[in-house]
């Protein structure tokens, strides 16, 4: 067997419904940078990576893409307890619990 013109390049891998698919290395500065992975229809916005998740809001689909396909791309900080989280969804859920604990400890 011969292999002709084999090239290597840096790629990241994205998990899509149980399989791993290579995606060319990219830099993301904000959740808005995931808009290239959104598929817009009249009724919903769908994740174009897995085409399973859909929602009516761009924000929720962006957070899905971050948490399921690019976890750890950004770091989010809880101002109440100084913990760091790898997805926006994780810090939002944490702040709800942490906020309850923080408020009860103050009184």
Image (cartoon, rainbow, N blue to C red):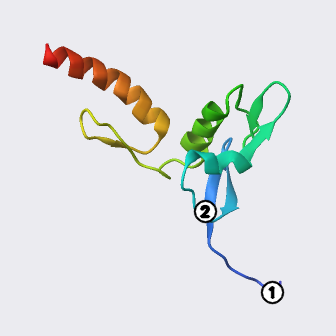
Vertical order, 90 against 36 (above or below)? above
Vertical order, 13 against 102 (above or below)? below
**Mark 2 secondary-structure assignment:** strand
The residue closer to the viewer here, 3 or 50, is: 50
**Disc nearer the start of the sequence (1/2):** 1
- Residue at image position (41%, 48%) is 75
Q: Is residue 55 visible?
A: yes
The residue closer to the viewer here, 54 or 104, is: 104
| Horizontal side of residue 39 vs 23, given as left or right | right
The residue where tag 1 is placed is 5
- Residue at image position (66%, 43%) is 18
- Residue at image position (62%, 58%) is 13
The outermost residue toward the right is 42
- Residue at image position (19%, 14%) is 104
Q: Quadrant of residue 105?
A: top left
Q: Percent from the top left, x then y, of residue 44?
A: 78, 27
How many marks do you count on the picture? 2
The residue closer to the viewer here, 43 or 68, is: 43
Q: Percent from the top left, x then y, of residue 96?
A: 37, 22
Q: Residues within 10 Å of mark 1 (few under 14, many from 20)?
A: few
Q: Quadrant of residue 98?
A: top left
Q: Is residue 48 visible?
A: no
Task: Quadrant for the N terminus, please.
Answer: bottom right
| Horizontal side of residue 100 vs 89, given as left or right | left
Q: Quadrant of residue 7?
A: bottom right
The residue where tag 2 is placed is 12
Task: Quadrant for the C terminus, please.
Answer: top left
What whole-number distance in Å separates the C-alpha atoms at marks 1 and 2? 21 Å
């Amino acid at each position: 067997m011969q292999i002709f013109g084999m090239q290597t390049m840096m790629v990241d891998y994205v998990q899509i419904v149980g399989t791993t698919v290579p995606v060319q290395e990219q830099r993301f500065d904000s959740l808005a940078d995931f808009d290239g992975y959104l598929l817009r229809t009249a009724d919903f916005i769908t994740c174009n990576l897995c085409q399973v998740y859909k929602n009516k809001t761009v924000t929720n689909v962006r957070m899905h893409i971050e948490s399921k396909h690019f976890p750890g791309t950004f770091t989010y900080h809880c101002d109440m307890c100084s913990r760091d989280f790898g997805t926006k969804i994780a810090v939002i859920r944490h702040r709800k619990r942490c906020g309850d604990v923080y408020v009860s400890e103050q009184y």
